[in-house]
Image: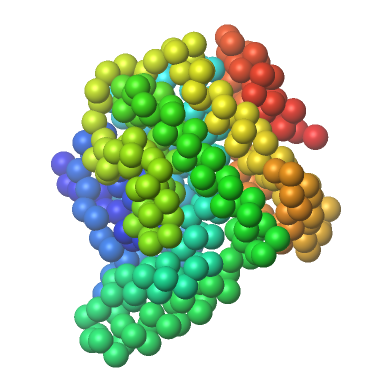
Amino acid sequence: MSNYRIFGSELSPYSVKVRSYFRYKGLPHEWIPRSPAVQAEFQKYAKLPLVPLVVTQEGEGLQDSTPIIERFEASQPEPAVVPDDRALAFVSALLEEYGDEWGNKWMFHYRWRYQPDAWSTAERIAQQMMGAQGTLAVAQARAAVAERMMGRLGFVGSNDRTQPTIEASFKRALALLEAHLQTRPYMLGGRPAMADFGLWGQFYEAATDPTPGAIMRASSPKVMEWVQRMVSPCSQGPFETWSALAPTLMPLLKDEVAALFLPWTAANAAAIERGDKSFEMALGGASWSQEPQKYHARSLAEVRRKYATAKDAAGLEAILKESGCLPYLTSP
């Protein structure tokens, strides 16, 4: 069997997420760091200038990490990353979306808000893109990357007003995951699930940056072990039941997903629907303001579609009611 090709970047949470999945599934693949040397081939298959890009053995280009994983999971379901328990499968999908969409705020905020983090990341990106052209080209690229990306903080809602909410959320999520991972190797038990891949990509990147990496190493040894484990994950046992997971997973659903992620994404979608250029809301006991983003509105629509399919699953309504997630999962 010929290899799949993954065009990606070590600095992209969605790229490493897909690579981790391919490693877990044993899918033969070639990891191709995106650089000018491969740009012509990248453009041949990519519809958007974004990584990851997976090129199939038939020459089809696939983009967007969650649809990529879902595509391969449908055709090659073993070893499964989706529990047979439909309620647990939806919870896992919801946590994956929380990681992809809200967790990205933590990673992007710390990476580009603090000067040491910005320069560290810009240096690594510049080396990947321009390393073959010499030190001057790398230095020039580093400055350009840092300036451009620091100017994009608004896209994830990072500003002076929202900084305390983002940083408090990161530390709270770390503490909740540290408690949850005390007795299990992965989010839902003995093997990785969709929840792991979505959350892990953001924490993996944060662990490589000076400021959030120091916070993680000082406070969350079990999370750091999980971060390392997920680089090349393997099954260590079955998925657990909801009753076994609930004592430490319900607080994450309550205090993060229902308290921050879902109200934020619902407000974003409403702002898009109204055609607003910005929106403000109370979030986490503080004021939140940012420009609305169309992709997040599509993401919420997909979560709601998945809920509509799964809503009759035994036990799911009780989980979502207790956590506070339910009101946000039905279309307004």
Relative image position of residue 269 (x, y in whole percent): 73, 47
The part of the image, by quadrant, that contains residue 143 is: bottom left
Which residue occupies 70% across, 43% down? Answer: 284
Q: Say whether residue 195 is left or right of residue 274.
A: left
Q: How many marks?
A: 0
Which residue occupies 42% across, 20% down? Answer: 83
The correct choice, above or below, for 310 with respect to 260 in the image is above
The correct choice, above or below, for 17 with respect to 148 in the image is above
Which is more toward the observer, 298 or 60? Answer: 298
Relative image position of residue 322 (x, y in whole percent): 66, 19
The correct choice, above or below, for 292 with respect to 226 in the image is below
Q: Hey, which residue is sitting farthest bottom in the picture?
A: 136
- Residue 17 appears in the rendering: yes
The part of the image, by quadrant, that contains residue 130 is: bottom left
Which is more toward the observer, 226 or 140? Answer: 226
Relative image position of residue 257 (x, y in whole percent): 61, 35
Q: Hey, which residue is sitting farthest left in the picture?
A: 1
Which residue occupies 21% across, 36% down? Answer: 26
Q: How is the image coloured?
A: rainbow
Q: Say whether residue 226 is left or right of residue 305.
A: left
Task: Indicate the quadrant containing the C terminus: top left, top right, bottom left or bottom right.
Answer: top right
- Residue 62 appears in the rendering: no
The correct choice, above or below, for 206 with respect to 140 in the image is above
Q: Say whether residue 199 is left or right of residue 57.
A: right
